[in-house]
Image (cartoon, helix red, strand yellow):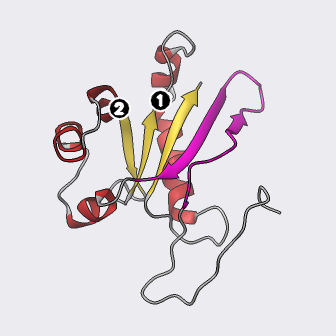
C-alpha cells in the first residue's frame, strides 16, 4: 500500500518512532495546486551517531556546519546546506538542500524555505505511517 515496502513491526521498548532503513529508491514529488512550485525529495538514514549527538545537545543549528565537517567528515557544501533539524527544531532528523544551482532557482527556493521547513517539522513530528515522530532520517531536496 505504501510504495510496496516491507514494514517490520516489533514491540516498543521505550518510545515508538518511525525511521528509514535505506535510501529512497523513488523520488518524492510534490506540487502546489497552482502548479507553480514543485519539489522533489529523497529520504535516507542519518549516519551513525548524529541522532545521538543532536539529542545530547552536542549538535545544533548554530554549530552544525563545523561539527558535521569535523566529526563526521561531511563536505562543507553539504554541511552548509542543512536547513533545519526536526521535529521541534531540535529533533534527530535533518532537511538538506541538495539542489543544483543551474537546475534550481535558489532565490525562489530561499523565499519559500520557511514553508518547506514548516512542512518538514510537521512530517517529522507526525511520521508517514503511524502518526509517530520520525528519528534518524535526513531528507534531501533534490530539485525545486
Q: Relative to residue 132, is residue 37 drawn left or right? A: right
Q: Of all residues shown, which one is farthest toward the right? A: 1
Extreme residue toward the top, this view? 102
The C terminus lies in which quarter of the figure? top right
Residue under numbered circle 1: 98
Q: Reply yes or no: does residue 51 show up in magenta.
A: no
Judged from the image, the secondary structure of the residue bearing numbered disc 2 is: helix
Highlighted range, magenta: 20-46
Instruction: Looking at the image, tell me whether mark 2 or mark 1 is earlier in sequence order.
Output: 2
Q: Secondary structure at mark 1?
A: loop
At a point 70% along the width and 42% down the height, the residue shown is 26
How far from the left and from the top, in percent, is residue 100? Answer: 50, 18
**Which residue is depicted at the point 45% across and 23% down?**
110
Question: 88 left or right of 126?
Answer: left
Residue occupying the point 83% across, 63% down: 1
Q: Which mark is residue 78?
A: 2
Alpha-carbon neighbours of circle 1 within 10 Å: few (<14), some, or many (≥20)? some
Circles 2 and 1, Cβ within 8 Å, touching? The answer is yes
Q: Is residue 76 left or right of residue 83?
A: left
- Residue 81, by quadrant, is top left
Q: Can you give x and y, in whole percent of width and height, for residue 87 in the image?
A: 43, 59
Amino acid at each position: 500500500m505504501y510504495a510496496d515496502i516491507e514494514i517490520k513491526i516489533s514491540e516498543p521498548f521505550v518510545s515508538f518512532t518511525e525511521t528509514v532503513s535505506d535510501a529512497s529508491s523513488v523520488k518524492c514529488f510534490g506540487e502546489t495546486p497552482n502548479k507553480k512550485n514543485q519539489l522533489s525529495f529523497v529520504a535516507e538514514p542519518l549516519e551513525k551517531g548524529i541522532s545521538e549527538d543532536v539529542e545530547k545537545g552536542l549538535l545544533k543549528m548554530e554549530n552544525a556546519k563545523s561539527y558535521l565537517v569535523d566529526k563526521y567528515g561531511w563536505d562543507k557544501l553539504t554541511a552548509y546546506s542543512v536547513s533545519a533539524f526536526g521535529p521541534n527544531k531540535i529533533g534527530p532528523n535533518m532537511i538538506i538542500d541538495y539542489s543544483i544551482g543551474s537546475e534550481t532557482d535558489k532565490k525562489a527556493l530561499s523565499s519559500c524555505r520557511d514553508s518547506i521547513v514548516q512542512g518538514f517539522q510537521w512530517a517529522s513530528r507526525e511520521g508517514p505511517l503511524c502518526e509517530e515522530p520520525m528519528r534518524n532520517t535526513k531528507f534531501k531536496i533534490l530539485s525545486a
